[in-house]
Each structure stands twice: as C-alpha cells, then as structure tokens.
Image (tube, coloured by chain):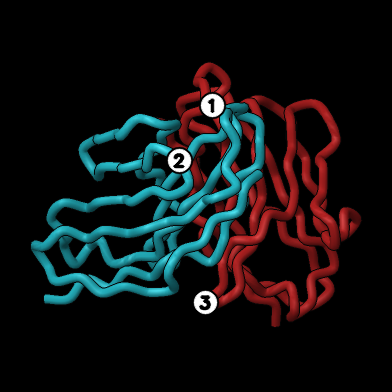
Chain colours: A cyan, B red
Amino acid sequence: DAKTTQPTSMDCAEGRAANLPCNHSTISGNEYVYWYRQIHSQGPQYIIHGLKNNETNEMASLIITEDRKSSTLILPHATLRDTAVYYCIVKGSSNTGKLIFGQGTTLQVKP
Amino acid sequence: GAVVSQHPSRVICKSGTSVKIECRSLDFQATTMFWYRQFPKKSLMLMATSNEGSKATYEQGVEKDKFLINHASLTLSTLTVTSAHPEDSSFYICSASRMERGPGSYTFGSGTRLTVV
C-alpha cells in the first residue's frame, strides 16, 4: 500500500473551514484514499473515502487531485468537537486488507 | 450504522496474569477483524489480522504466543494478553470490516485501556 505524508499539526478557528492536506504520490490505480479521525482515547472514526472523484458526505468533503497524488479533507465549519488526529490512508479495494496508520495530523480547533 | 463493541473499556491486572478483550460486531457480520495497540501520543500499530475460523496473521515483531487471538464467529474476536507485564500496558483497539460492502469503511471499537501493575 502506498505511503502518505501529512503535516504533523494544524490549527483552525471555530466556524471556519479546516483543510487537511495529504500527499500520496505513489498511489496506484486501484487504491482508494481513506480518511479517519481519532478523538482522544477513543477508537478511530471513519470520515470519508474516494478513488478519483471528489466526494462529499454529512461530515466532510474529499478533494482528490487529477493525478491522484494528493488530496484534501475539508471540514466546512469546524467545531471544537472536531479537535482530533486525522489520518489519511491509502488502501486497495479489498475489504479484508489492512488499514495502516501513519502519524496523522493533529487538528486543534480554537474558539 | 455499523457498530463494533469492545469490552472491557478499562482493565487493571497484576503482572503475570492474563487478560481477555472482546470485540463484537453488533449489527453486521465481519469478514475480517483487526487488532491494534497504541502507546501514548503515538499512532495505531497493527498487531494482527483475523478471519473467522482460521488462525490469525500476526505482524512482524508481534509475539503470537503472548497475544492470543481467537475469531470464533463472524461477529466475535477475542485478544488475550497472556502473562501480562507492565510493558504490555497500552490502548488496544479492534476493527471489523463488513462482509457485504465493497471498498467501504472499517468500523472500530472504542478501545480497551490495559494497565498492568
């Protein structure tokens, strides 16, 4: 599975959009981009995933570049409860494959 | 939505004893279950992958005789930490993937905080 690179930490003002970047320059054609987040002392929570088209759900939007070498997770109106570690993971389509976590981005939403 | 229940949420045990952690998928059948451990301020580290009715596959460096995994059914996997020592103190998290979905989401349990004294 391809590796990902994310900034270690980011700050965001409450109510503003949080844009979390992820580089995955070695992604292969059948690999998806997944985003999870982990709030302190809890299990990770699924946010969104995509292959090549942009995706949106009730939690976030995922923008994937045309060459698929990077993506951005957008939380449109960040709240204090969005403070968490956000993980970008690249994985194949099998639902038996391993999710390997990198270091993630610690997002601090400030009042 | 898919729910994974992990029990217990916290456990304190004495050195040398064994501890069992349960992971159940409540409203779906899990193709595969995964076990992770996490040290403070660190990322999740995959320990092993288990499929119902077969032996678990352990990641490199994980002692299979120390961390026993049993995947008895499509909704239950257990992790037993045998002869626990203080260095086994950690946050253990399970995850389950749904059988009928494609490249979809994996659901995680809420984790078990193990403290060995």
In this picture, residue B79 sits left or right of residue A103: right
Residue extending farthest to the top is B100
Q: Are marks 3 and 2 on the same chain?
A: no
Q: Secondary structure at mark 3?
A: loop
Residue where numbered disc 2 is placed: A68
Q: Which residue does the image show at 84% across and 73% down from the upper left?
A: B16
Residue at mark 3: chain: B
Q: Secondary structure at mark 1?
A: strand
Q: Please give left or right for residue B97 compared with residue A1 in the image.
A: left
Residue drawn 65% across and 42% down? A98
Q: Position of residue B94 (x, y in %)?
A: 59, 48
Q: Which residue is mark 3?
A: B41
Q: Quadrant of the C terminus of chain B?
A: bottom right
Residue hosting label 1:
B98
Q: Where does the N terminus of chain B fall, quadrant-wise?
A: top left
Residue at (26% x, 42% y) in the render: A61
Amino acid residing under circle 1: Arg
Q: CA distance from mark 1 to mark 2?
A: 26 Å
The image shows residue A9 at horizontal and vertical percentages of 38, 74
Task: Tell me which corner region of the image, top left, top right, bottom left or bottom right, holds residue A67.
Answer: top left
